[in-house]
Image: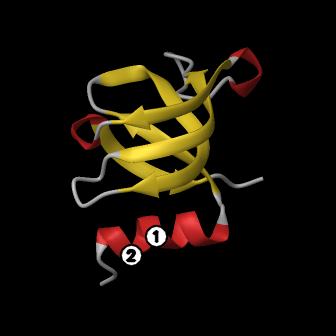
Amino acid sequence: MIPPINCIFGFLQQQNLVTIWLYEQVGIRIRGKIDGFDEFMNIVIEDAVEVPVNAKNGVEEVEKGKKLGKILLKGDNITLITAVDD
């Protein structure tokens, strides 16, 4: 098993575009590139976009996304981090 911190470090090194699911926020997700993180999984996201999620089918509506720029996302708010498939 790969430790979670190593997985996040891999996304950072490879500059993967990631989608972050937020705790108790099923209607939105955050998409961007990881710019840094710490031992508490607080994550700095570069070129962050707030992406709405369709409530009926769970599909991300990227074209309706709101650009946020560079943000700091507190680790307590993160449920899941996944690489984006292009």
Label 1 SS: helix
Look at 55% across and 64% down and name the residue there.
Answer: 12
Along the line of sight, which residue is nearer the eye, 32 or 69? 69
Along the line of sight, which residue is nearer the eye, 84 or 38? 38
Along the line of sight, which residue is nearer the eye, 33 or 56? 33
Label 2 SS: helix
Look at 46% across and 42% down and name the residue there.
Answer: 20
Left or right side of 12 for 5: left
Alpha-carbon span between mark 2 and mark 1: 5 Å
Query: How many residues crowd mark 2 within 10 Å: few (<14), some (14–19), many (20+)?
Result: few
Q: Any mark on residue 44, and which?
A: none
Q: Position of residue 10 (x, y in %)?
A: 52, 73
Question: Which corner quadrant of the image does residue 49 belong to?
Answer: top right
Write down the residue under mark 2.
6
Q: Position of residue 33 (x, y in %)?
A: 61, 49
Q: Any mark on residue 9, and which?
A: 1
Q: Quadrant of the N terminus?
A: bottom left
Query: Which amino acid type is shown beneath numbered disc 2?
Result: Asn
Q: Position of residue 18 (x, y in %)?
A: 58, 50
Q: Are the residues flagged by discs 2 and 1 in contact, CB closer than 8 Å?
A: yes
Query: How many residues crowd mark 1 within 10 Å: few (<14), some (14–19), many (20+)?
Result: some
Q: Position of residue 8 (x, y in %)?
A: 43, 64
The single residue placed furthest to the bottom in the displayed view is: 1
